[in-house]
Image (cartoon, grey):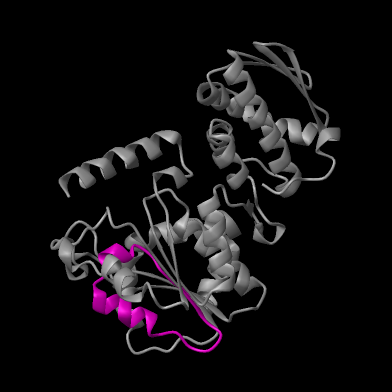
């Protein structure tokens, strides 16, 4: 995380003894953000750091063994710093602060570096990378023409890509954002689903809508969709088009064939960016060998204009339990192979 100025004026952390820590936060808005509504953030932090936290006035007292006390101290520093930089603290920040505080010193140094230019400010929230790999991915989204990311759910692939795409649209750096994914889930086919094409396709694209609304608000996004500045469509609709002044994202690319991914990548036109995201461990195709994501990586890995970013379970930004689940499933797959 970028080190905010005057952090020491906003928070005072004092060690009372080897098992007790006192944290004083002098800014009321920061204090409320750190504590959370009905103390929910403190409750979550207690579970994650194996400490007991007592809140009174502008003071928080932490009790636990020596290592846990040190970890919770690092967590509070991170959260105060995050608030000063972005003016907000979310549940994901609580989880990340605890996860990072328990990392090795080397990993802390890697994960705490967030250049100012990588803070993506949107109308509803500021998006900050929570790992070295997320930071690398965000830099690629900002600077490269074609980015392909592979990794498990919860690593921020779609969320970060959507935040950069729509921010560039709002800043008029591109004229249009196109969000696409293969309409393939659990063996269903569009022709057998009720409704017109929009009704058939929308459920598959719901995660992209969720990211848009979460970052920019319903009304603002809906206006952009109505004017065609934001287009959400199944991958099949991309055939035959040339994308100029556009930012296009292909999500869930593990469910696309090699031919489909090639078709998407060859749509690139003047002043455009293309992003392909996928999780090779979540292929929904009946014949999993038809997935073109890993084949695309093998074919294009030596093309320097194509940037590959690979995430693993250590980059999962959701609840720590998600990372454990992802790791367990990946181990099962690796054992089979």
Residue furthest to the left? 287
Residue found at x 75% / y 35%: 30
Left or right: residue 4 versus residue 190 is right
Residue found at x 52% / y 61%: 137
Q: Is residue 200 visible?
A: no
| Relative image position of residue 325 (x, y in whole percent) | 33, 37
Left or right: residue 195 versus residue 245 is left
| Relative image position of residue 200 (x, y in whole percent) | 28, 67
> Is residue 57 shown above or below 27?
above
> Is residue 222 shown above or below 62?
below
Front-most of residues 186 and 23: 23
Front-most of residues 257 and 137: 137
| Relative image position of residue 155 (x, y in whole percent) | 45, 50
Residue found at x 58% / y 45%: 111
Q: Is residue 258 a member of the stretch shown in magenta?
A: yes
| Relative image position of residue 308 (x, y in whole percent) | 43, 66
Front-most of residues 84 and 226: 84
Front-most of residues 122 and 6: 6
Q: Is residue 168 visible?
A: yes
Q: Is residue 26 a member of the stretch shown in magenta?
A: no
Query: Residue 322's quadrant in the figure?
Result: top left
> Is residue 226 shown above or below 36?
below
Q: How many marks?
A: 0
Query: Residue 35's quadrant in the figure?
Result: top right
Q: Which residues are magenta?
A: 248-274
Residue found at x 60% / y 29%: 41
């Amino acid at each position: 995380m970028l080190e905010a100025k005057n952090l020491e004026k906003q928070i005072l952390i004092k060690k009372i003894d080897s098992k007790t820590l006192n944290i004083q936060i002098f800014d009321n808005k920061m204090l409320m953000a750190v504590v959370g509504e009905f103390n929910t953030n403190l409750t979550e932090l207690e579970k994650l750091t194996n400490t007991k936290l007592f809140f009174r006035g502008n003071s928080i007292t932490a009790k636990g063994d020596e290592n846990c006390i040190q970890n919770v101290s690092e967590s509070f520093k991170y959260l105060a710093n995050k608030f000063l930089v972005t003016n907000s603290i979310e549940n994901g920040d609580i989880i990340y602060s605890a996860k990072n505080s328990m990392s090795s010193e080397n990993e802390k140094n890697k994960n705490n570096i967030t250049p100012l230019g990588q803070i993506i400010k949107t109308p509803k929230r500021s998006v900050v990378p929570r790992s070295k790999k997320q930071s690398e991915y965000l830099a690629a989204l900002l600077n490269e023409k074609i980015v392909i990311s592979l990794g498990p759910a919860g690593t921020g692939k779609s969320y970060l890509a959507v935040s950069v795409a729509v921010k560039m649209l709002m800043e008029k750096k591109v004229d249009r954002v196109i969000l696409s994914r293969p309409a393939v889930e659990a063996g269903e086919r569009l022709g057998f689903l009720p409704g017109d094409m929009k009704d058939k396709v929308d459920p598959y694209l719901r995660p992209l809508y969720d990211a848009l609304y979460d970052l920019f608000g319903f009304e603002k996004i809906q206006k952009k969709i109505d004017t065609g500045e934001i287009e959400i469509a199944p991958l099949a609709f991309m055939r035959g088009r040339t994308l100029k002044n556009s930012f296009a994202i292909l999500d869930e690319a593990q469910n696309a064939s090699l031919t489909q991914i090639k078709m998407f990548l060859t749509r690139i036109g003047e002043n455009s960016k293309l992003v392909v995201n996928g999780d090779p461990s979540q292929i929904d195709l009946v014949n999993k060998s038809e997935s073109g994501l890993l084949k695309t990586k093998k074919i294009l890995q030596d093309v320097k204009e194509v940037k590959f970013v690979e995430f693993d379970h250590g980059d999962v930004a959701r609840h720590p339990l998600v990372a454990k689940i992802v790791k367990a499933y990946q181990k099962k797959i690796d054992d089979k192979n």
